Image (cartoon, rainbow, N blue to C red):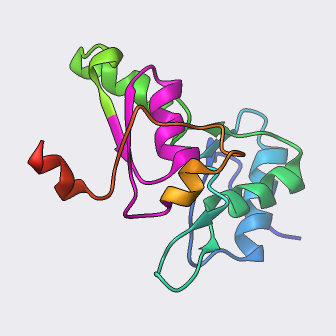
């Protein structure tokens, strides 16, 4: 029998290079046996790019392990959830329509900007390629796109 701290008030899951079965079980126990315990996910990215050589399992795979073992859905506080955008807009008193979200992923960065009511700029120097952007199956379209960040300096 594994012991767990009954005072744990939140299990926060995100990308973890040292993710293991022990962590899944501990988080599962806290979420199942601590009645008020929150389940928070930093993001649900299926993959991440740690190197240029290949895609790696992302934070979403780690979140998925706890969703599977607890049958609970997390509160997602990172992209593309509007949680962070709402906070920043309120904290700095900036209208969301005057913000432009710049990023290299359609499914997180650009969707985050769109969900938050911002303009969006996709940079093609990271995860998303021009062919992915132009793929007819792609439903997420940014307001603008550029090949790389330095291209913005010429504007």
Q: Report x, y in % for residue 6.
A: 71, 48
Q: Is residue 104 left or right of residue 108?
A: left
Q: Report x, y in % for residue 57.
A: 66, 71
Q: Is residue 14 above or below residue 43?
A: below
Residue 120 is a magenta residue: yes
Residue at 72% in and 46% down: 137
In this rendered view, identify the residue nearer to me: 151 or 48.
151
In this rendered view, identify the residue nearer to me: 7 or 118.
118
Q: Quadrant of the C terminus?
A: top left
Q: Quadrant of the N terminus?
A: bottom right
Residue at 59% in and 38% down: 140
The range drawn in magenta is: 101-129
Q: Is residue 42 left or right of residue 34?
A: left
Residue at 49% in and 57% down: 130
Q: Is residue 78 above or below residue 115?
A: below
Q: Is residue 59 left or right of residue 148?
A: right
In this rendered view, identify the residue nearer to me: 43 or 46.
46
Q: How many marks?
A: 0
Residue sticking out furthest to the bottom: 53
Does residue 121 appear anywhere in the picture? Answer: yes
Residue 30 is a magenta residue: no
Q: Is residue 89 left or right of residue 11?
A: left
Q: Report x, y in % for residue 153.
A: 11, 49
Does residue 3 appear anywhere in the picture? Answer: no
Residue sticking out furthest to the left: 154
């Amino acid at each position: 029998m594994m012991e767990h701290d009954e005072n744990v008030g939140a299990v926060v899951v995100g990308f973890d290079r040292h993710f293991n079965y022990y962590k899944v079980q501990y988080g599962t126990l806290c979420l199942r046996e601590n009645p008020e315990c929150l389940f928070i996910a930093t993001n649900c990215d299926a993959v991440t790019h740690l190197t240029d050589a290949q895609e790696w399992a992302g934070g979403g795979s780690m979140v998925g392990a706890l969703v599977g073992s607890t049958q609970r859905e997390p509160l997602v506080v990172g992209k593309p959830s509007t949680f962070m955008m709402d906070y920043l807009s309120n904290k700095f008193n900036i209208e969301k329509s005057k913000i432009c979200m710049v990023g290299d992923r359609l499914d997180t960065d650009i969707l985050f900007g769109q969900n938050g009511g911002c303009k969006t700029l996709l940079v093609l120097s990271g995860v998303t390629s021009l062919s992915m952007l132009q793929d007819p199956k792609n439903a997420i379209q940014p307001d603008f796109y550029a090949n790389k960040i330095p291209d913005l300096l010429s504007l």
